[in-house]
Amino acid sequence: MAGVDTAAVKQLVAQARQQGLQLSGEGGLLQQLTKIVLESAMEGEITDHLGYDKHDPAGAGSGNSRNGARTKTVLTDVGPVEIAVPRDRAGSFEPTIVRKRQRRLSGVEDMVLSLSAKGLTCGEISAHLAEVYGAEVSRQTISTITDKVMDGMTEWQNRPLDPVYPVIFLDAIHVKIRDGKVANRPIYVAMAVTVDGCRDILGLWAGDGGEGAKFWLSVLTELRNRGVEDVCMVVCDGLKGLPDAIGQTWPQAITQTCIVHLLRASFRYAARQHWDAIARGLKPVYTAATESAAQERFLEFAETWGHKYPAIVRLWENSWAEFVPFLGFDPEIRKIVCSTNAIESVNARIRRAVRARGHFPNEQAALKCVYMAVMALDPTGTGRRRWAVRWKAALNAFEITFEGRLRTASK
C-alpha cells in the first residue's frame, strides 16, 4: 500500500496481540486506530484553518486560536468511536472529515442501505448493528438514512433516455401494501438493452389494483416523453391490450409475447400430471424454423390435446399474432427475445427483497425497497460486463435486421 509503512503496522498488530488486545470489537485495535486517524485528521484541518501549528508562538495575537475540544461518539464501520473534536475561539472552524452534528461516517450509511436493499427491516438492521458492532441506532435513524435515497430515485426516474433501444422488456411484480387493508399492488418495471449491449432499468412505477394495459400506456408515454423515439422490439407477457398500447407509442416496434409466460398460462389450464407432456408437445411449436412449420406443429398439438384442454388451444390462437414475430429472425435474436428471462432475473432479486419485508405500510416504502434492490443488483460491475458480451451476437443480428434504426442511438 503506497504511503503506508507496512512494517510499522505489523509491529503494531504484534504488540497488540502480546498485550492481549483484540483487533476488532469494542475497545479493540481497529477502534483505537480509527480514533487516532480521525483526531489526527481534524487536528490537521484546524491547523490549516488557523494557519499555525499547535503551541506555535506565531498564533499569538492572530485573532483566533484553539479552544480545547469537545467529545462526541460517531458510528463507524468498526463500531462506535469516541473522538475529541477541536474547537476555535471564534467558532468558525467547520471540520469536514467528521462534520458538525454528524454522528455516522459514510461507510455506516452505505452498510444500512445495503442491508435495506436485501430486504431487512429497520428493526432488523438496528438489531444487526447492535449485535455485530455494539452500536445503538434507532429505527427512526435508519429510516432517515434510507429515506435519503428517495431524492436520488426521483432524479433517476426522470433522467433523459436514449433515443433508440433494440429491445425493451416489460413486466410487473406484485407487492403487498397496507393501505387500510393489505392488498396486492403491481410495481411496473421496464428494462432496456442499449445499443452497446448494456442493461438499463428505465424506471419503476407503482400501480393501483391489478396489472392493466391502460397503466402500461401511461408508462410507455412517459418513456417516450423522456426521449425514447423508437424501439425495435418490445417483449412482454400476453396482457390484453398491451400490444395496442405499444403500437400507439412506437408504431414501428414489434411486440413479442414471452414464450415462458405463454407456457405458464397454458399450465394453469392443465392438470399437474400433464404438464411435462404438454411442454413436450408445445416445444416443436416455438422452436420451429418458420411460421408455417410452427403452424403445422400447433395443429398437431391441437389434435392431441384440444379435446381435453380446449382453453390452452384458444390461448395460443389468441396470442398467435404476438407469438410468431421472433420466428422470422436469426437464431441470435430468437435466443434473446423469445422470453422475458432477462427481466425475470432482475425481478427475482426484487422479489427476494420484497419477500423478506412481507408487506409495506405505503406505496413509497414499497418503491423505496424495490429501488434499492435495483441499485444493488451489480455492485462490482461483473454482471454488466458479462451481459454486454452475451449480447454482442444479438446486437449484430439486430443491426442487420433493423438496418439503420440503431444508428440514431450510437451517434
Image: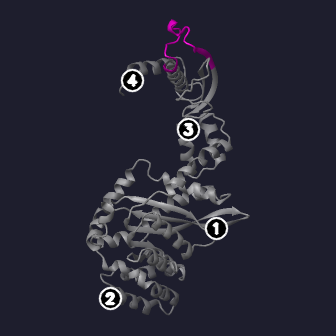
Q: Amino acid at mark 1?
A: Asn
Disc 4 element:
loop
Q: Amino acid at mark 3?
A: Val
**Residue 50 in the image, given as x and y percentages of width and height:** 52, 17
Instruction: Measure the C-alpha gap from mark 1 to mark 4.
Output: 55 Å
Disc 3 element:
helix
Q: Is residue 262 visible?
A: no
**Residue 215 in the image, given as x and y percentages of width and height:** 56, 72
Among the two numbered marks 1 and 2 on one chain, the one whose residue lies closer to the N terminus: 1
Q: Which residue is mark 2?
A: 292
Q: Nearer the viewer, residue 218 or 110?
A: 218
Q: Residue at x 41, y 84 (%)?
A: 321
Q: Nearer the viewer, residue 273 or 307?
A: 307
Q: Which residue is mark 4?
A: 4
Among the two numbered marks 2 and 3 on one chain, the one whose residue lies closer to the N terminus: 3
Q: Residues within 10 Å of mark 4 (few under 14, many from 20)?
A: few
Q: Which residue is mark 3?
A: 108
Among the two numbered marks 1 and 3 on one chain, the one whose residue lies closer to the N terminus: 3
Q: Residues within 10 Å of mark 2 (few under 14, many from 20)?
A: few
Q: Which residue is mark 1?
A: 184
Q: Quadrant of the C terminus?
A: bottom left
Q: Residues within 10 Å of mark 1 (few under 14, many from 20)?
A: some
Disc 1 element:
strand
Q: Amino acid at mark 4?
A: Val
Tell me if label 3 and label 4 are in contact, CB under 8 Å: no
Q: Residue at x 32, y 59 (%)?
A: 196
Instruction: Measure the C-alpha gap from mark 2 to mark 4.
Output: 71 Å
Instruction: Measure the C-alpha gap from mark 1 to mark 2.
Output: 41 Å
Residue 45's place in the image compared with 79, above or below, is: above
**Residue 83 in the image, given as x and y percentages of width and height:** 59, 23
Q: Residue at x 53, y 53 (%)?
A: 153
Q: Is residue 97 magenta?
A: no
